[in-house]
Every structure is written in C-alpha cells, then in structure tokens.
Amino acid sequence: MSDKKQKRRSQHWFGGTGLTGYVHRSWMRNQGRPDDFFDGRPVIGICNTWSELTPCNGHFRELAEKVKIGIYEAGGVPVEFPVTSLGETLMRPTTMMFRNLVSMDVEESIRANPMDGVVLLTGCDKTTPALMMGAASCDLPTMVLSGGPMLNGKFKGQDIGSGTHIFKFQDEVAAGTMSRDDFLKTEAGMSRSIGHCMTMGTASTMASMAEALGIALPGNAAIPAADANRGLLAQMVGRRIVKLVDEDVKMSRILTRDAFANAIKVNGAIGGSTNAVVHLLAIAGRLGIDLTLDDWDTLGAGVPTLVNLFPSGSYLMEDFYYAGGLPVVMKRIAAYLNTNALTVSGGTVAENIADAECYDDDVIRPLDKPLTENGGIAVLRGNLAPQGAIIKPSAASETLMSHTGRAVVFEDMDDYRSRIRDSGLDVTKDDILVLKNNGPVGYPGFPETGNLALPPKILQDGVRDMVRISDARMSGTAFGTVVLHVAPEAAVGGPLALVQTGDRITLDVPGRRLQLHVPDEELAARRKSWQPPAIPEDEERGYAKLYRSAVTQADTGADFDFLIGKSGAKIPKSSH
Ligand code: FES
C-alpha cells in the first residue's frame, strides 16, 4: 500500500489487522464490500438530507446514487449517511431553530466516522448552511452539491414563483382582487417538479453562495433539479471529491476571507436573500475568519444587481439557467471579485468563468443596464439597533428609503394576528409597523415573520408596501421595505423592546440610520419597568432551553456560542 493510502484518515478504522480493524471491516462487509473497499482508497461520506418531510430534497436518494458513480469512477468508495433534515414548509416553530442542531449532527457524524472527504447534499433553505457549518468545524476536503431548483411555476399561462407569489396572491385575496378558489388552484402550479424554491429565495441564494465561495462546482446554483445535467453535475462532484482528497485540499483552503468577500459581492449581483447574512457569518465563524456584519455593507457596496429574478425582478431560476447561470454573473462582475481564489474545481474563479457566455441579457443584465445600481445589503445602525439591522434595498420601495413615521407596535405574532385585520386599527400607510419578540431568543428560533402582511384596509386602498421593522428574519422570496435582524433583539432587552405605539422612527437607508425619536431619559424610565417575556413551561427543558441559552444575536450569525470555531477531524478514541 502506498504511503499516501496508509496515512488516510479512514485507515485508522480499516487498516489494522487486530480486533479493532476486524470489527470495523467485518460489519461493513454485510453490505457486500470487497477487500479493496478497505485498501486505503479515499472513503467519501455523502451527507444526505433526504426526507419526505423536506419536499425540496425529496429526490436526494437518486442524486446520491449519481455522486456514488463518480466516486467509484475516480477510484474512491462512497459511504452515504443521513443527518436530520430541515423542511422549511413543515417544521415548527422554525427550521432556523434547528440549523445549529443539524450542524452538530453533521460535525459529529463526520468526525466520528471513517471519512477522508465529504459531499454535502443540500437544497431546502437551512440544509445548506447547517451542513456547511458542521463540515467547516471538521475541515476535511468537502464539496457542496445542491439539489437544484424546481421548474418555473405556472398558473393560467403566467410564470409564478415559489413563495413570492404566495405573498402577492395573499395580498390580492385580502384586497378582493383574487378569488379564494383561484388562490388554492395555484398550489399545484407553483410546485410542479422536484427541487427547491425557484425564485431567488434562500435556497437558490445559498446554492449561489456555495458556487461563489468556490466550494461547489460551476453550474451548481442554476441547473434545475429535473434536468439531466443536475445528475451529471452530481457525477462530476463524485469524481472531483476523490481528487480533492488525493490533493488534500481542505475546506479551509477554499473558504478564505477572499472567498467570503466574493460571495458577498455575488449576493449583491444576484439580489440574494437577506438570510445569507446570518448564514455566511455563522460559517465564517466556524472557520475563524474575521467576517463582520459591516463587511456586508462595505464589501457589497456599489455592486449592481444584474440578475432579474423574483423577488427583486421578473424571472425564475429555470430562466437563469438557460441564460448561463452564475458563471455569467461572476464574469460580469469579475472586476469586483478576487478571481485568483481557489475553488474545488481545481481552478481559480478566473478559470471557472473564462468561457461563460450569456444567452439572455434581460435575465442576466449587462453591467451598464443593471436591475438596480446598488444591490446588496444595507447595514443600519442607530439607537434602535446598536448592534445593527439590515435591509435589502433592491426588494424595497424607493419612496420609503428615507422615511419618518409613527410606530404601530405589535408585542409578538399573537398580538399582530389578533389586531391586524381589525378595521378599527389606528394605522395609515405612512406609519411604521413594528414587531417585537421574533428574534433568535424571543420566538424562539428567529422566524421569517419580518415581512408582515399589511392591514387589509391599507391594501384595499391599493397600497402594497409600508416600512416594517422587527428582530425577525424574512423569507428570501419576500419583498418590501422591511428592516430585519434588529440587534440586540427585544427579548433580551434591546431598545426595540422599549418602542411604543405613537413613537416616531426614522429609517434612513442612504445614511444607514435607524433612529427612535424618544429622549434617553424616557427610554431609561421605560427600561426600568421592562420585563423579559415569560418562557412557556414546556420550553424550560430540552433543545429549546439549550437554544435559548446558547444562541448568539443576529449580527454574529445566530450560531451557538460554544460551536464557534473548529476542532478539525482528529481521530477519536476507539471503543473496541
Ligand atoms: Fe424548501 Fe423553499 S421551501 S427551498
């Protein structure tokens, strides 16, 4: 056996001739493994988030088989293993609450088992960051393979996009311009093939982030799940991960600060989800990379949004694929990028995008005809958000970017739901809807409730946007002048907790300000009588208790404080 083979991590399990090696091999042989399975060739873990409860990842058993073909072809051996999956549409209270839990599942599954490299099968929103966070803390050679978006949604001859059109239809029903019957008929038209949401929501954004970071192969973001090329990409990933193990290219060689800077800029160019902010901060935290909330504003500043996809634009991921996908975007903004960054393809960003060609300039706009001049994320600060808050200008209304209004406050979602439809609610279109206690600790689990639906009486007047402010997140498929991730959150006593209906608030996106116009003395008096929200008895134990006690605020990624950093993939003690 060559030196290289002998030194492989997996050989600490499979290489010995004593009792331990016997035990490790013998039980694996019940799956019909030949002798050469154990001879020191790269053992590649395929981390699978397949679940029927995660419909976006429902095709992952077939996708894993394609990866295996590639691994075998390149001389490696695959071992597929499950981790907890995170189905955005079904899990309660939120998948975000379980992102950190899954990251632990991934980290410990990798470290505890004989793997030399890992392929992460990701799709639905939180599956991508959860798997990347866990794998980053182990730092083996690693590749991300996304499951791909669904085909374009269709209803009455029109394209309809996952999530985005639900919000639009909901407003139309409330305004009386769409029937409930039509609303329900759109369900099947919206989700008509395998794959994840096909707007530029969080899933497509995170698949794009993986590609921009260089941890996924070119083409990863856009190829539809139902397209034969998705399976082909999976096979190529299988081939490539074996080479990465051979070359010992660890995850930390790819995920450098330069790579994160590239991803932030690409997020601006694609009009990506605000959720990428917390996820990339959390992944960088695992790798010890000094990435801050402010980097989102400073690094992303001036990058134009080129990708004309819902929710910011008019097309969907299938169109994006036919137009050339992410390599075209990266080529068009190459001047903003660190094109020397190494990627898992074996080449640099520059090499990966050299041959990219655009086939539809309306879907991927040229630099001189962008969808929005300044894409990206604006980071706001002020006495209402001392640790920061964010807004996505490309999804907001230009007319509301500098706005002072009267706060209409909701203490939590129950309060909001009980009053928002009340025709007697004292609210005008110029007011600012403020939602408290929807942050990481407050909900708990940092839900996507920030894009509060407007009061029906406002919608009936034809108004479709108002300023909204909360400590919540927002679905990547949503839109509006929505200030999110206010930190510190209300439930831990952030200034948001002190806002009362009638207070005046200024949102000044060009000036990056979020200001509550209440004198300091008055705020101090309110603080004296403030009480943190009561925690229900059933959340005083188990994971909810762990989550509340360890989750960090939005500005540092809402990871668990004890998970930040990495421990590598040292060989644990044997139990035999
Ligand atoms: Fe899974 Fe949108 S619900 S990606």
Image: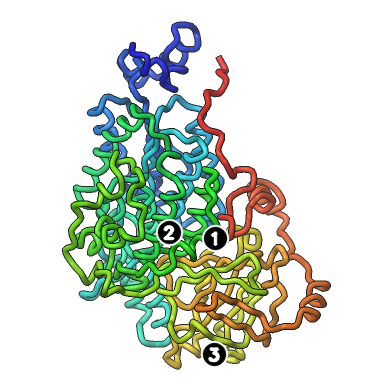
Please provide percent x and percent y for residue 277. 49, 59
The label shown at residue 430 is 3
- Identify the amino acid type marked 2: Ile
Contact (Cβ within 8 Å) of mark 1 with mark 3: no
Report the coloring of the rendering. rainbow
Q: Which residue is mark 2?
A: 264
Mark found first going from the N terminus, 1 or 3 = 1
Q: Is residue 541 above or below residue 141?
A: below
Say which of 303 and 325 sits in front. Answer: 303
The label shown at residue 293 is 1
- Identify the amino acid type marked 1: Leu
Foreground mark, 1 or 3, reads 1
Residue for point 58% across, 50% down: 559
Name the quarter where the N terminus is drawn: top left
Measure the alpha-carbon separation of dots 2 and 1.
Answer: 11 Å
The label shown at residue 26 is none
Measure the alpha-carbon separation of dots 1 and 3.
Answer: 29 Å
State the image quarter where residue 237 is shown: top left
Would residue 56 be visible to someone looking at this image?
no
Mark found first going from the N terminus, 2 or 1 = 2
Please provide percent x and percent y for residue 88. 45, 57
- Left or right of 27: which side holds 96? right
Q: Residue furthest top?
A: 18
Residue for point 51% across, 75% down: 482
Please provide percent x and percent y for residue 372. 35, 75
Foreground mark, 3 or 2, reads 2
Residue for point 49% across, 62% down: 296
Report ligand 1 position as a quadrant: bottom left
Mark found first going from the N terminus, 3 or 2 = 2
Would residue 238 be visible to someone looking at this image?
yes
State the image quarter where residue 93 is shown: bottom right
